[in-house]
Amino acid sequence: MDELRTHIERLDEAILTALEGRSLFLTREWSRPELQTLLDLTELFQAFDRARVQVPLFPNELFLALFFDASTRTRSAWAGAAARLGAHPVVLDGSSTQVSHGETAEETGAMLGMNVHALGIRHDLIPGEGNTFLRAAHRGIVDYLDAIGERRAVPVVNLQCDVDHPTQSLADLAWLRERFPEGLEGKTLTVSWAYSPSYAKPLSVPQGAITLMSRWGMHVRLAHPPGYELMPETTEAARRFAQESGGSFTVFNEMDEAFEGADIVYPKSWGPYDLMLERVEANRAKDLERMADIERRALERNRAFSDWICDERRMDLARGADTLYMHCLPADIGSEVSPAVMERARMDVAREANKKVYVIMALLAMAKQTRLRARLLELLGA
C-alpha cells in the first residue's frame, strides 16, 4: 500500500487538472508531459488491479462504446475498464445507429449524450471519415449539454479511427516501458507491413505506432512494399517527433533491411493507400459492388508480397531471441508471422494486449474525476 500511495503522490496534479474533460482523438495532439502522466496513471491502475484495490470512481454511470468495425480485444478492454471504475459498460454496433439513414455524427452524439457519461467510438475503415466522425459526435454532445445547461463531462475516446488507434499505441508504449525499464531512448523499433490473405486492414495501427513511439527518442523504422504508403501527415509527424526527441525515423522498402539489428519488431498488415482512398468515393456513393471490387484488388495486390512474413530468419536478422515481437492481435499466423515466432511471443503479446484496459481506465478517470489524486488516496484509505 505504501508503494501505491507513493505512486499516487508522484502524479502531476497540475497536468491532471488540465486534462479534466479532455477527449482523446489523436495522441499527437497531446503533449509529451500529458502522455507521461497518462502512462503513469495507466501503471497505477494496473498496480491497483494486481493488489485487488477497487476504484469505483463512477458508480451508476453509463459508459457506451460504438463500433462501426469488428473488434474483440478493444470491446473487452472498454467493458473491463468501465466495470473496474464502477460504471455500467454497454457496447453497440454501428448498425444500431441511424447513420445509414442519414443521421449526422452531431445528431448521433447529441442522442447518445443525453444518457451516457463516456463514449468510445471505433470508425476506422474509410480514410478521411473516421476521425472527423469522432470530432463531430463530440461537438453534438457538447452542444446538447450546453443547450440544457448541464455540466457533465462526457469524454469521447478514439477506439480506432482512420488516422490513429490511440488506446492500442498507448498500450504498446506502456508494455515497452515495462519491458525496457532502463528507458526507450536509442532502442530500434521496426514497424513493418506484413502479408495477410484476409481483408485490407486499416492504416491506423502503424500510423499510431510511428507517431507515438517517435516521441520517446527511439529509432523508428517503417517498412512496406511500394504502394503501401501511410497517410503523408502521419509520416511527416513521425519524422518531426523523432527529430525533436533525439531519435530517428527512416522508411524502408525491404523487410530484411528494416529488421537488421532491431530491438523490437511490429509486423502488421494494412491495405494499399491508393485503394483505401478509392474506398472513400465508393462508400459515399454507397456502391457496394465497387467496394467489393476494391477489396478484391487489395487482396490480389497483397499476394504479390506474400514473402513479407516475420519468421525465424528475420528475427535472427534483428537480435534473435532478444528481439521483442509485438502485435495488436489477431495476427494472421502463417502469413504475417510464422507459428514458431508467435508461439515464442505468445505471453508477450498477451501482456501487451492487457495494457489496453488500464489505458482506457486512465483516460476516463483523468477526463471525468476532479481532484483525481486526492480521490485515489481516499480509496486507498490514506
Image (cartoon, rainbow, N blue to C red):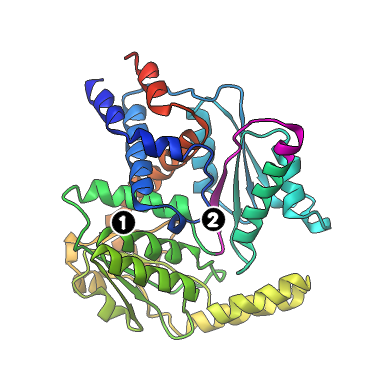
Quarter of the image that includes the C terminus: top left
Observer able to see residue 347: no
> Could you tell me which residue is drawn at 40 percent across and 48 percent down?
353
Q: Quadrant of residue 357?
A: top left
Q: In the image, what residue type sits under mark 1?
A: Glu
Mark 1 in CB contact with mark 2 (< 8 angstroms): no
**In this rendering, would 110 be left or right of 87?**
right
> Could you tell me which residue is drawn at 73 percent across and 78 percent down?
290
Q: Residue furthest right?
A: 101
Residue 47 percent across, percent down from the top left: 31, 31
SS for tag 1? helix
Residue 80 percent across, percent down from the top left: 49, 35
Give neighbour class at mark 2: few <14, some 14-19, many 20+ (Cα, 10 Å): many
Can you say whether 371 is above or below 187 in the image?
A: above
Q: Quadrant of residue 209?
A: bottom left
SS for tag 2? strand
Q: Residue furthest top?
A: 381
Q: In the image, what residue type sits under mark 2?
A: Gln
On residue 160, which mark appears? Answer: 2
In the picture of the structure, the residue carrying the numbered disc 1 is 343
The reply to whether the magenta stretch includes residue 298 is no
> Could you tell me which residue is drawn at 38 percent across and 46 percent down?
34
Q: Mark 1 vs mark 2: which is more N-terminal?
A: 2
> Could you tell me which residue is drawn at 49 percent across and 84 percent down?
227
Residues 4 and 148: in front is 148
Magenta range is 144-162
On residue 40, which mark appears? Answer: none
